[in-house]
Image (cartoon, rainbow, N blue to C red):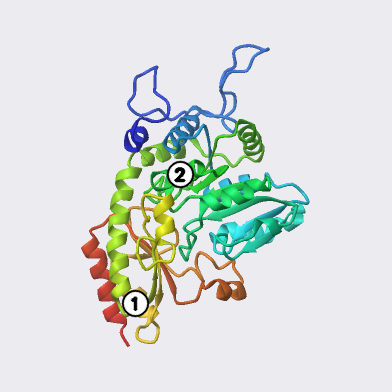
Amino acid sequence: MGFNTTAVHGGFVDESAKAVNYPIYLSSTFTQPDTEHEGEYCYSRGNNPTRASVERAVADVEGAKYAIATASGMAATSLILELLNQGEKLLINNNVYGGTWRFVSNLLEKRGVSYEVVDDFNTYDFAKADDNVSMVFIETPSNPLLDVTDIRRVVEEAHKRGILVVVDNTFMTAYLQKPLDLGADIVVYSATKYYVGHSDILAGLVVLNDEERYQRLKFINNTLGGILSPFDSFLLQRGIKTLGVRLDRHQDNAQKVAEFLEKSDAATDTYYPGLTSHPGYELHKSQAKGAGAVISFRFNEDRYDLQKFVAALRIFAFAVSLGGVESLICRPSTMTHESFSRELQEKIGITPNLIRLSVGIEDAEDLISDLQQAFDAARK
């Protein structure tokens, strides 16, 4: 079946009442058959029918065997990083989600795990990697500079050394990019973003094919308790049903907005993998079927006032997050990536005038008009 058909019909079927939507099981515990046997569902932290249904749906749209739904995107990332053992080392690309960096830079060391920040995995020499490297964690396109990493290359080189490859695919979703098909071992998502799509719940996902690793992650997730609630599982599955049609509109709008920004003197640089001027344009096209709907640009503070620009916006909301139907705008250096030191921000290029847009599904003409009138209001 095609993606949209799978998205609508994936997950479990309600055999008892024949409901079109699989029901919400708001029960913390379940009756067991007898003293010697345990049923499929025992306690909702370990397993819940509604959560199991959305996990099945997620695996279906990814073309994967297993999925785990967590309480947030960071719960999903934290779950994966629990696979690292004392004495091992993590490789991570230099611009990733700020919460991921907060975990890596603050919590790994006390667990006896080291890490190395890699500026460009497309040229990184894995033959020179330390022998204790056990995991590579990449985002592509990256957050917030939209750098594109060659997933196939990373997988090929990492696997030669027995290194696990994890891809944060939040910006793309399985609709636009499938890292497992490109050889990655695990995919993680902040499902809060495009999978949910309406900015109303937090959720995370881990998707993989290896049964032994899946059972290990299920054990860890049950032990730590970072599970997705039944009600939020229901809303996540509802969001998945419209994921494809929403993303079609998201990225159609984003392409138009990016082309507008590229021509505007208010933006000195525009970062969007759907622009032919993007250095990763061809590479991204080779591994994804769309450019997504996140754009970053550098605000021209020589000619425009940033505070006046933000204050003048009428449709774009000045807020963190992305992937909802509404358009958002933020400044990564102080909002999403404040956990990066000022020195690291400068090294990477997360400057105070770097602005990130999450382009929603409104009418593109209205979004462009909103940006233009705000630029006009901010002209010095």
Q: Report x, y in % for residue 304.
A: 35, 83
Q: Is residue 304 left or right of residue 340?
A: left
Q: Report x, y in % for residue 222.
A: 63, 35
Counting residues from the start of the chain, the first of labels 2 and 1 encountered is 2
Disc 2 residue crowd, few under 14, some 14–19, many 20+, Cα 10 Å: many
Quarter placement of the N terminus: top left
The amino acid marked with disc number 1 is Phe
Quarter placement of the C terminus: bottom left
Comparing 201 with 183, the one in front is 183
Instruction: Name the residue located 78 percent from the left edge and 51 percent from the top edge.
Output: 87
Q: CA distance from mark 2 to mark 1?
A: 37 Å
Q: Is residue 358 visible?
A: yes
Comparing 119 with 126, the one in front is 126
Using the rendered view, name the quadrant where residue 314 is placed.
Answer: bottom left
Q: Report x, y in % for residue 283.
A: 44, 57
* Residue under label 2: 178
Q: Report x, y in % for residue 129.
A: 70, 57
The amino acid marked with disc number 2 is Lys
Secondary structure under badge 2?
A: loop
Instruction: Name the residue located 49 percent from the left edge and 56 percent from the top edge.
Output: 140
Using the rendered view, name the quadrant where residue 361 is placed.
Answer: bottom left
Q: Is residue 368 left or right of residue 241?
A: left
Q: Is residue 105 left or right of residue 373?
A: right
* Residue under label 1: 309
Secondary structure under badge 1?
A: helix
Instruction: Name the residue located 32 percent from the left edge and 81 percent from the top edge.
Output: 378
